[in-house]
């Protein structure tokens, strides 16, 4: 406790209602204490630090002016929601962030009435806020009541097409709605005259003439750190249409830019728009990610995601790696292949670091495309590249590929275009919980005609699958791999492509066959060793392919064993369902095969360590061993099906 910051004012805030009696000067003090508490908490838990530090003043101002939970404050993505959680009755649990049984790292409806809408994927907040506004005007009812709707969205999230769809609809409906653009990239720079003219024009229109006085110092509102990047500011001015900004053309009243760290400006603007707005309003606030914590401000990612760290030095306490990460193995393999094949190119949707494609981008910038938070576009753009004779690798997390599914079906699969999908974060992902789990990709890809779907059992297999995908031009192909480090196997040099649809035998046994897809193979192997100590010697096979299945291998396993069990890190309807369909079509069940499919349970699993999450899922070695014993039964041990 001695290392925790002194927060006398914050200690008195149990809910936003406690802020209503504070003076503006006290709100400034509260923001300082809230920033210190956020830094302290995340230093103990790890998590998304920079985004929250960038909205501390905005968070305080919003809760001081609006009346949550009646007024619905929706944080897009919600990486930045930690300060919000501290102010809304969850400070006593803030040091359980992203831990088993603790607070979610994102807003979550089941966690608090102050989280009216769960977010974790990008660009959804404006749509949700507009829905609340429409429900309010239609006489709807929900916990806390229905008042104003406020969406807080970053400039990165605003690049997502769904945000513009929502704004277009909001402008048409003309509902009272507030969108706060939390812009932590745009730097307002000289020439001062041009910016002064721009702000004068923005502040001149109805119904916000008086904001020139309310948001004092508008022309020189930004501190020196924001006066870098003159070119970007000039470009913004150059592309503004005469007669209004893009937002005004969409039907929004536009207010800004304002300094998102100046409490006086924030309070003045928010109080004014709350009192006077009738339709949709966009408030453009310039902020600095990582604000107020020097190590975050210095970091390249502005402290976006951190492990536990020392508050004084900012040094993170990362565990030493025992093996390269799957992501780095994918990236290094792809870079090596691209050196030999100028047709190989790569596409990411705002995740160059997370997908490892930053390495590709450093070497082959002209062949690497970061399309922003736009998974639908990323998929169809990749399809266009493929149709144009290139060999595109579309690298997207499993959870985010869900956002581009129609494009996968319509633009890639139906046209049989050879797009290579590198699906990172397959399976359960730990601290990010249910919203980021890679549970569904096998199920939603393997049901598409002529779609090849692979799952790497280890990092060596991943290398082979990247090579296989690079050389496969007959249609779409996908390979999935998990978050985190590999198992420490030797990385093959000069790997050869796999034969499409062919599994590999790991160990030959009898009685029961364990058919594994993906990295559960390590747990399957441990279960097989434990079973061997009991006198049961299972056959173990790495399926490699969810589609096409190795029919010869699978039918042989069914013929030669009493029981067949599939194991996968995916939802119901995936690999095991395809195996069951194959067995049913060949009449295998008619002759008494005992068949079981071990999949992720039909629930959303909350954050915990990956091992704990797989314990919940029942997919660890002990669970596999228990499944084998249950299927065979003591009387069946050593008995082989005729």
Image (cartoon, rainbow, N blue to C red):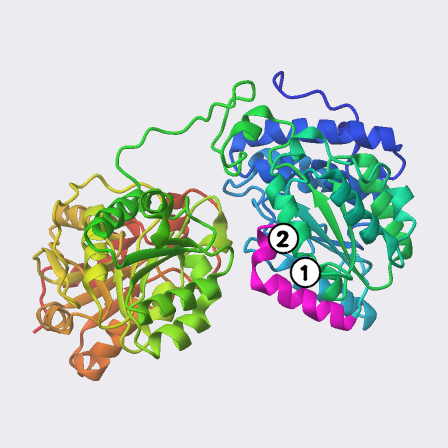
Q: Is residue 574 above or below residue 335?
A: below
Cβ–Cβ under 8 Å for marks 2 and 1 = yes
- Residue 48: quadrant of the picture: top right
User: Was residue 171 drawn as part of the magenta stretch in this picture?
Assistant: yes
Residue, x 21% and y 83% (percent of image)? 585
Residue, x 70% and y 70% (percent of image)? 169
Q: Residues within 10 Å of mark 1 (few under 14, many from 20)?
A: many
- Image location of residue 511, percent across then percent down: 11, 62
Q: How crowded is mark 2: few (under 14 residues within 10 Å), some or many (20 or more)?
A: many
Quadrant of the image containing the C terminus:
bottom left
Asked if residue 141 lies left or right of residue 37, the reply is right
- Image location of residue 135, percent across then percent down: 76, 69
The Cα–Cα distance between marks 2 and 1, rounded to whole angstroms, is 8 Å
- Image location of residue 77, percent across then percent down: 58, 51
User: Was residue 641 drawn as part of the magenta stretch in this picture?
Assistant: no
User: Observer-nearest residue: 84 or 467?
Assistant: 467
Magenta stretch in the rendered image: 155-173
Asked if residue 346 lies left or right of residue 560, the reply is right
Residue, x 17% and y 79% (percent of image)? 588
Q: Name the residue under label 1.
A: 126
- Image location of residue 573, percent across then percent down: 36, 71
User: Observer-nearest residue: 533 or 185?
Assistant: 185
Residue, x 27% and y 51% (percent of image)? 519
Regarding mark 2 in the picture, which secondary structure is present there?
loop
Can residue 218 be seen in this snapshot? yes
Regarding mark 1 in the picture, which secondary structure is present there?
helix
Asked if residue 536 lies left or right of residue 330, the reply is left
Asked if residue 506 lies left or right of residue 613, the reply is left
Q: Name the residue under label 2.
A: 76
- Residue 240: quadrant of the picture: bottom right
Residue 140's tag is none
């Amino acid at each position: 406790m001695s290392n925790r910051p002194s927060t006398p004012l914050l200690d008195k805030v149990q809910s936003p209602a406690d802020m209503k009696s504070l003076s503006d000067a006290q709100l400034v003090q509260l923001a300082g204490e809230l920033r210190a508490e956020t830094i302290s908490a995340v230093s103990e838990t790890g998590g998304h630090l920079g985004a929250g530090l960038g909205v501390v003043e905005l968070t305080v101002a919003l809760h001081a002016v609006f009346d949550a939970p009646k007024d619905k404050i929706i944080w897009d993505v919600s990486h930045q929601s930690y300060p919000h959680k501290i102010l809304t009755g969850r400070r006593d649990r803030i040091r359980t962030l992203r831990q088993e049984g603790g607070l979610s790292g994102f807003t979550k409806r089941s966690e608090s009435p102050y989280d009216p809408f769960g977010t974790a994927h990008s660009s959804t907040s404006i749509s949700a806020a507009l829905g609340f506004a429409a429900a309010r005007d239609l006489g709807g009812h929900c916990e806390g009541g229905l008042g104003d709707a406020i969406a807080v969205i970053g400039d990165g999230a605003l690049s997502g097409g769904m945000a513009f769809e929502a704004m277009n609809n909001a402008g048409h409906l003309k509902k009272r709605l507030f969108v706060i653009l939390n812009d932590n990239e745009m730097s307002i720079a000289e020439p001062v005259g041009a910016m002064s003219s721009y702000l004068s024009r923005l502040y001149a229109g109805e119904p916000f003439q008086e904001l020139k006085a309310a948001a004092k110092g508008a022309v020189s509102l930004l501190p020196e750190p924001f006066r870098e990047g003159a070119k970007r500011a000039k470009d913004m001015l150059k592309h503004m249409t005469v007669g209004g900004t893009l937002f005004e053309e969409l039907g929004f009243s536009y207010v800004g830019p304002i300094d998102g760290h100046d409490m006086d400006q924030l309070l003045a603007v928010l109080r004014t728009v709350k009192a006077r707005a009738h339709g949709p309003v966009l408030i453009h606030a310039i902020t600095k990610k990582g604000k107020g914590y020097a190590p975050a401000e210095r970091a390249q990612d502005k402290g976006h995601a951190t492990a536990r760290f020392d508050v004084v030095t900012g040094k993170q306490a990362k565990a030493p790696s025992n093996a390269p990460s799957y992501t780095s193995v994918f990236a290094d393999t792809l870079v090596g292949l691209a050196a030999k094949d100028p047709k190989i190119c790569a596409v990411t949707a705002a995740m160059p670091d997370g997908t490892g494609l930053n390495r590709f981008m450093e070497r082959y910038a002209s062949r690497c495309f970061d399309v922003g938070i736009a998974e639908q576009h990323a998929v169809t753009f990749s399809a266009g590249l493929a149709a144009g004779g290139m060999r595109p690798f579309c690298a997207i997390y499993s959870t985010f590929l869900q956002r581009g599914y129609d494009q996968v079906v319509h633009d890639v699969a139906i046209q049989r275009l050879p797009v290579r999908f590198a699906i990172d974060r397959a399976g359960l992902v730990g601290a990010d919980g249910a919203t980021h789990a890679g549970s569904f990709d096998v199920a939603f890809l393997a049901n598409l005609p002529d779609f090849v779907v692979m799952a790497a059992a280890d990092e060596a297999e991943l290398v082979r699958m990247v090579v296989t995908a690079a050389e496969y031009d007959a249609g779409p192909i996908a390979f999935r791999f998990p978050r985190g480090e590999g198992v420490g196997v030797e990385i093959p040099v000069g790997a050869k492509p796999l034969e499409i649809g062919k599994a590999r035998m790991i160990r030959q046994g009898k009685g029961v066959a364990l058919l594994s897809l993906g990295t559960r193979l390590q747990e399957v192997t441990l279960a097989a060793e434990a079973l061997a100590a009991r006198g049961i010697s299972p056959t173990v096979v790495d399926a490699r392919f969810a589609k096409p299945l190795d029919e010869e291998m699978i039918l042989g396993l069914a013929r030669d064993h009493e029981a067949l069990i599939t194991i996968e890190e995916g939802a119901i309807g995936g690999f095991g369902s395809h195996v069951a369909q194959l067995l049913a079509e060949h009449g295998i069940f008619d002759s008494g095969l005992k068949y079981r499919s071990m999949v992720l349970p039909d629930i959303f699993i909350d954050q915990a360590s990956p091992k704990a999450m797989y314990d919940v899922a029942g997919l660890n070695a002990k669970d596999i061993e228990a499944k084998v014993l249950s299927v065979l039964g003591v009387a069946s041990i050593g008995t082989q099906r005729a």
